[in-house]
Image: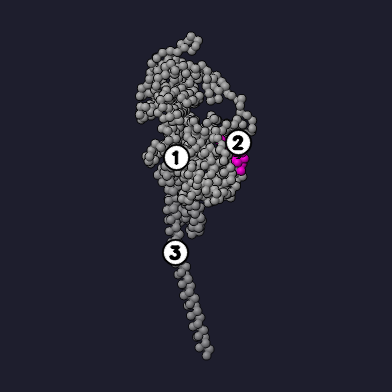
Amino acid sequence: MVHMSSETKRDTTKWDGSSQEGGNNKREQEITVLSVELMNSQRLSAIYGHTASVKKPRWACQDVAASTVAEYGGTMVNLQNNVAMASYADPNEAIKSAIRMSTILNKQNSELPEEQRIDFAISINQGKGIIENDRIYGPVVNRLTKMTHMYGQKNKIYISENVYVAVKDLEGTEYRPVGAISDGFSRKFNIYEVLWKDNVNLEAHESILISQFQHRYALIEGVHEPCFYCGSRKHLVSHCPSKHMPEITQAFDKLRHLSVRQINALFSDSIARGLDEVRHRWENTEDVPDAYFNAYYAFYDIKRVYQLRFFRVIMGYRGNDWHMATKMNVESNGEALWIAIDHLRTGNLVQAESLLQKLNEENPNRFIVNMAMGYLNVEKGYYTYALDSFNNAYKNTETKPRKILALLLMCRINDLYLKDIRAAGEQIGLIRMLERDCPEAIYQDIVMRMRYEKDSEAIPQLIRLIKGRHEYYLTALIDPEFAGCQAKINKELHALLTHAEENAVSALKETENRLNSLKSWFGEDNQNARDLHETLSKTRELYASDSYFGYLDVSCKSASITADYNRLERESREKIKDFVNNLHHQIRQFSGYFGEGKKSAFANMLDNLKEEAVSFGKDLNLSISYKNAMMRHDELSKQLLVIQVAVDKLKKRKANTSFVIGLLTKALLFLIVAASLGLLILFIIDVG
């Protein structure tokens, strides 16, 4: 077997086949630049060895620095092994960022033995710089480097005179002059050390805290090639933490009603603690704070469909519904193949390969074996062989979910490692033929189009996907795949958030107006009105979450409240109208019982009741309240009852009269018949 190198050259071919080279975006502008330099990398190398000594500075410079830089509106640039550099538009935010960064790193150092601590120096300068793609150079960077080399001392922050002038009034900070440097043209610039008090205000400026995720870069940047399972460069594929996660985490459900600011704070804290090492820091994961796990799970859940834990779901799923398969959770059945997968999960590639080769010899066309071989080749870096294995798996299965998974994994290899964008696009097309609305395929198509600058197609596609499947709002918000185009993505997500908020405000206002109308109709003490107002109060709490899903829920719940309002009002009005109609019907029936000519008291009462009924019917279409309507309902019902009693008496009297008349009639008839018989008898006797 010929082994392919895991090193792959980045292809510069765009989606449409044209070259990206020559598209530099170079510009000079006034900027503030911050650098964090590791001072003791050689000593760490002697302690840990070269690999670990590289990882430690990367952990400090990228995880802590990148997270903090993003929190204050900066942009990470010019990353090297021992130096992390960032640019800011506002020097005040750069100072706050440096203080926060220093505080976090010093706290981490306090938890380590002295020989393992990471010494750093932070320097900040302001001036003209040239920004080209993700690099900054020019006088501002040259002076910054000179500052660090001349005055940098471990765990200190230094700023240039330009920065000092801009930030000297920042509350809670002090500045101590330490010397000066020359810019090479006989001009000298004073250098200051930054000191701060415990009460220093490190709150980021409100304009920085807009609706954008700030930690994409910090989540994935590292020394390795992208991980197949999650995309991070912080670990090898065989060491991906996703392999030790449960199939279903509900992490995104727990983030749904957090604002973007809260999500940023959650990830900021988790990244600073070492998001990638969460499972190695606690022997008992039950002791891990829930919020910590929410960030941890959410990041790895973005690419769940490519991970071993999802493959285990597909192994155990026997249905043909892709959407249902993505929501399943399965248990291991203990057979040899599951054992091989478990070896893959724990990084025991030799044992996994031995088992899989034996299983492959027994049945080379078995879908699950080919899939497992594909994952094995991915972890070994043999991407062409992995592609062949997944393709064989695709050809040897008939169920839709299994075909879709094999195609997604092939697409992942072509996109992430082989840079064969056409093949990846073809595989997306095959998935869409199997499952037209497969969200995972649609999303991957969007990611690739954005990567290859097909924004005009990708962005409308992303918006449609989010509107159809709201969970993709959070996916798009956090996904590091969009690091290269995050300004565009942030703009679109902010527009969605703003639109959702506007709809929520409109829905709340309309619902409040309707409920005020309902209160006027039912009255203050009506239980139905109180229940709806209580539901509205809880809905306002969702609005206060300042989250996309909170706003969507506000609109949805407001619509539900409005529907309940409409139903209650309709039913109550129909109830009153039914009574009025019944009142008119009974009046018409009763009017015949009191005759014509001189009217009795009951006849007059019936006429008055008739006028009241007509007036009541008219008032129902005006501003009469339900409470008043029910009071009039009760009053008219009492009057109707009096008339009903009178009518019942008349009916009874008429019935009695009819009975007596009938009885007399029968008696008279009997007497007539008897008399007739008597006369007949007398006549007969007389004749005889």
Name the disc covering residue 652, or none: 3
What SS does tag 3 mark?
A: helix
Identify residue type, mark 1. Answer: Lys
- x and y percent of residue 358 in the render? 52, 48
As drawn, the residue found furthest toward the top would be: 186
Residue topped by disc 2: 420
Q: Which of marks 1 and 2 is in front?
A: 2
Magenta stretch?
Answer: 414-430
Callout 2: 10 Å neighbours few (<14), some, many (20+)? some
Q: Quadrant of residue 53?
A: top left
Q: Nearer the viewer, residue 494 or 660?
A: 494
Residue topped by disc 1: 254
Label pair 1/2, CB-CB below 8 angstroms: no
Residue 623, placed above or below residue 177: below
Q: Nearer the viewer, mark 3 or mark 1?
A: 1
- x and y percent of residue 191 in the render? 42, 15
- Answer left or right for 417 relative to 545: right
Identify residue type, mark 2. Answer: Asp
Q: Which colour scheme is used?
A: one colour
> Which part of the image, by quadrant, shows the N terminus?
top right
Q: Which residue is drawn at 55% across and 25% down?
A: 133
Q: Is residue 225 magenta?
A: no
Name the disc covering residue 284, or none: none
